[in-house]
């Protein structure tokens, strides 16, 4: 794949030139759908709407792209940090945004209708626990990760007023102590998550805990530093991840993976161009999926649609 600022659409040339000193340009195959040089990485998409975090830590805002154009999420204030966001459906099928909003050392979970109305999400955290992710909503279900001081961490799913159920982590995540749930997404009856420590496992399963599938998405040991930077569940329970990978002596890589249930895992490596800036940043820092469309956060440029090209595609069924 050939990368060059000159090959991008004219509207991207200026953005690439500004970003060149800090991060590589996006691929010429990508299409910019929302220019935003301040897009920070965290993003989510559903039903033709994209929401992402813009700005630096300490002064972050929420932006959205709809058929009407690009604008700030109405009424969502500037905050110290929006570490986790998710788009889902409420009990009436309407689009709903959930997020963790941090001011000072306190983070609050909120649900937002994208029209200026929001409310706190309560009743999910037992004593001595806090949410490790924004709750993901779909109908009457809500999925979330817990960070607790005196009990096991885990992935939880709650339906209506019924007690929450803790879903199983992958066998290898239990074996190697990957207990922290750092990302969650919920689509219909499929839930996806990341269980992280030195090794980070991405997994999907039914909300009942059945039909679990997983893979080792990232590992940070020796001269390697890898972390899952984005996760999304697509149609049919297909699990997508974005990993930022740094290996001493090699250009930084953004690795996109797709786990197709009961079939295989596909991956695409999007590496920085070799050269003096090959270990400065990554070409993608956020991921979201809406139907068949994959979106990435391209540093210094904004939100782009990306044609996923697997190195080894799954065999046809």
Image (tube, rainbow, N blue to C red):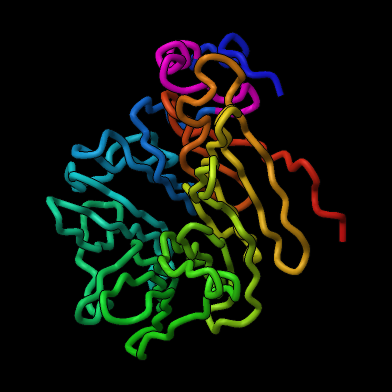
Left or right side of 306 for 122: left
Quarter-wise, where is residue 239 in the image?
bottom right
Q: Relative to 117, does residue 17 appear above or below in the rendering?
A: above
In the rendering, at what x and y percent does residue 83 appear?
31, 51
In this rendered view, identify the residue nearer to me: 162 or 133.
133
In the rendering, at what x and y percent does residue 26 appear?
55, 25
Counting labels gives 0
Which quadrant of the figure contains the N terminus? top right
Farthest residue to the front: give it.
222
The residue shown at (20%, 77%) is 128
Which quadrant of the figure contains the C terminus? bottom right
Quarter-wise, where is residue 70 in the image?
top left
Quarter-wise, where is residue 154 in the image?
bottom left
- Residue 17 within the magenta-colored segment of the rendering: yes
The residue shown at (20%, 61%) is 108
Left or right side of 248 for 137: left
- Residue 280 within the magenta-colored segment of the rendering: no
Q: Which residues are magenta?
A: 13-31
In the rendering, at what x and y percent does residue 301 appear?
44, 24
Q: Is residue 117 visible?
A: yes
Farthest residue to the left: give it.
104
Q: Relative to 271, does residue 225 appear above or below in the rendering?
A: below
């Amino acid at each position: 794949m050939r990368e060059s600022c000159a090959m991008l659409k004219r509207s991207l040339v200026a953005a690439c030139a500004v970003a060149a000193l800090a991060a590589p340009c996006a691929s010429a195959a990508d299409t910019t759908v929302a220019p935003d040089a301040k897009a920070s990485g965290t993003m989510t998409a559903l039903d033709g709407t994209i929401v992402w975090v813009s700005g630096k830590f300490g002064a972050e805002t929420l932006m959205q792209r709809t058929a009407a154009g690009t604008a700030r999420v109405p009424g969502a204030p500037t905050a110290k940090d929006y570490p986790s966001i998710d788009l889902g459906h409420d009990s009436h099928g309407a689009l709903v945004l959930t997020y963790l909003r941090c001011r000072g050392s306190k983070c609050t979970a909120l649900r937002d209708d994208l029209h200026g109305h929001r409310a706190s999400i309560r009743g999910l955290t037992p004593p001595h626990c806090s949410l490790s992710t924004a709750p993901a909503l779909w109908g009457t279900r809500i999925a979330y990760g817990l960070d607790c001081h005196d009990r096991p961490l885990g992935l939880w799913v709650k339906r209506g007023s019924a007690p929450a159920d803790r879903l199983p982590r992958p066998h290898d995540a239990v074996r190697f102590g990957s207990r922290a749930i750092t990302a969650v997404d919920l689509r219909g009856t499929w839930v996806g998550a990341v269980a992280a420590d030195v090794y980070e496992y991405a997994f999907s399963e039914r909300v009942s805990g059945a039909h679990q599938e997983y893979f080792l998405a990232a590992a940070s040991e020796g001269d390697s530093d890898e972390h899952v930077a984005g996760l999304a569940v697509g149609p049919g329970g297909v699990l997508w991840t974005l990993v930022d990978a740094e290996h001493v002596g090699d250009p930084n890589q953004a690795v996109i993976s797709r786990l197709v249930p009961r079939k295989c895992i596909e991956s695409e490596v999007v590496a920085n161009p070799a050269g003096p800036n090959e270990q400065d940043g990554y070409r993608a820092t956020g991921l979201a999926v809406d139907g068949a469309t994959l979106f990435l956060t391209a540093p210094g440029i904004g939100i782009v649609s990306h044609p996923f090209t697997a190195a080894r595609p799954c065999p046809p069924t």
